[in-house]
Image (cartoon, rainbow, N blue to C red):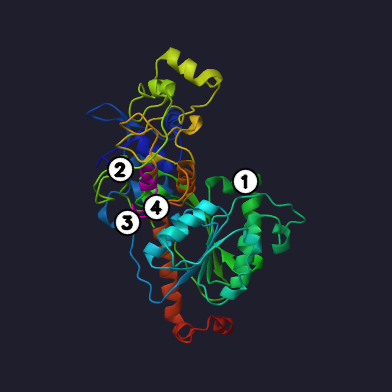
Amino acid sequence: MDSHFFSLSEVADVMGVSKETLRRWDKNGKLKSVRHPVNNYRVYTPESLKQFESHGFVFARSADQMHEMPVSVPNHAYSVVELFAGGGGLAVGMEQAGLQCAMLNELNKEACNTLRMNRPHWDVREGDVSKIDFTEFKGRVDVVTGGFPCQAFSYAGKKLGFEDARGTLFFEFARAVKEIEPLICVGENVRGLLTHDAGRTIAGMTSVLDELGYEVLPPQMLKAMFYKVPQKRERLLIVGLKKGLGLKFAFPKPCQETYNMRDALKKGRLFDADVPASPGQQYPAWKRAVMEQVPPGGYWRNLPLDVQKAYMMKSFYLGGGKTGMARRLSWDEPSLTLTCNPAQKQTERCHPEHTRPLAVREYARIQTFPDAWQFSGSVAAQYKQIGNAVPVNLAKAIGHSLIDALNAFYALHPFLFCNGNRSLIEGI
């Protein structure tokens, strides 16, 4: 970032709004831009952005306001049970932070093969989560995590109870929490959960966990690009703390430094070597001819008008920016959010330099998987596992926050761990 100005793209990324929205704010006076004295681009001064207090950490300039991701060392052997584990992004990040995996559940066969192939010692239980009995872990596990889908509930009354959530995968997550009784439960999801079913879905989830004896903190949206992830990805975090124990949890603080596609694919700040070669999808000849005309960071609007109309077809005449179509990534910016397929027409993810979709290992790098972490299955199956994952470095930051919370708790109650009997918690 420039030491005196923020670009239109940088502010849009931080604020979570489009460039078009920023231009509209400029016109109506909500957020005024200035022109850069050298290149005359539209930019923003740190002073003009102070009104957005929730993003002050990024717009800060003094050294004492800048954050680096903390590294917390566990004082004991803390354990995690994870549901809906997928290809392992969350689990790998938790492991890197210092948490021990007690058990993982996943329905997809290839994802389970990936977990077993990389970590033969992990207890990977493949199959329907509703068939698993979690009571064997009661009092033995500190944290339960899971990225459950956001399915709507049927409301019988104003306050949703545990039994009312039956038939949803969140119910299985809640059942695991009920049977294991961890100190902390962590659910992760997409931004859409906040507004799903007009906000009633997340309110119902909070109500269920409250009934089970957990204080649910206000959900927080974490932007992966501020946690050493070269990607404009967001994950919603829902954290529940077992009531009556004095547990405290602080969401991980973002760091000001961001990373781009060059950091992802080249030797440098994130990786000690260039991205290894790997298989990947290829464009058919007609699409390659179109994508070759798109510059780095560009999209369909950068094409000649006749090519735009031929490529976009009916979409050309519809509203909206459709900025993911015919999109080529830029070396100097973080990747757009990865999907399960790098060549989907609505969410194109073309390599910054070569005219082809991102390859499998490039996908994995953008999600900050270690190069040693291999994926099982077809190329399509590998893309899906990677695209659905929690970025490893983001998971690691969450893991360090969990370790801080657990260290503080056990420092106050050391006899619980010394006795190896978490059932004594009931007596606190």
Location of residue 348 in the rendering, given as x and y in whole percent from the top left corner:
44, 32
The correct choice, above or below, for 293 with respect to 3 in the image is: above
Expressed as whole percent of the image width and height from the top left, the position of residue 111 reads: 50, 53
Residue 357: in magenta span: no
Q: Marks 1/4: CA distance? A: 34 Å
Query: Is any atom of residue 209 visible in this view?
Result: no
Q: Amino acid at mark 4?
A: Gln
Q: Amino acid at mark 2?
A: Leu
**What is the crowding at mark 1: few (fewer than 14 residues within 10 Å), some, or many (at least 20)?**
some
Q: Is residue 371 magenta?
A: yes
Query: N-terminal of the two: label 1 or label 4?
Result: 1
Which residue is label 2 attached to? 265
| Magenta-highlighted residues | 361-374
Q: CA distance from mark 1 to mark 2?
A: 35 Å
Front: mark 1 or 3? 1
Which numbered disc, 4 or 3, marks the residue that appears first in the sequence? 3
Q: Nearer the viewer, residue 416 or 207?
A: 416
Residue lying farthest top?
Answer: 306
Residue with the mark numbered 3: 67
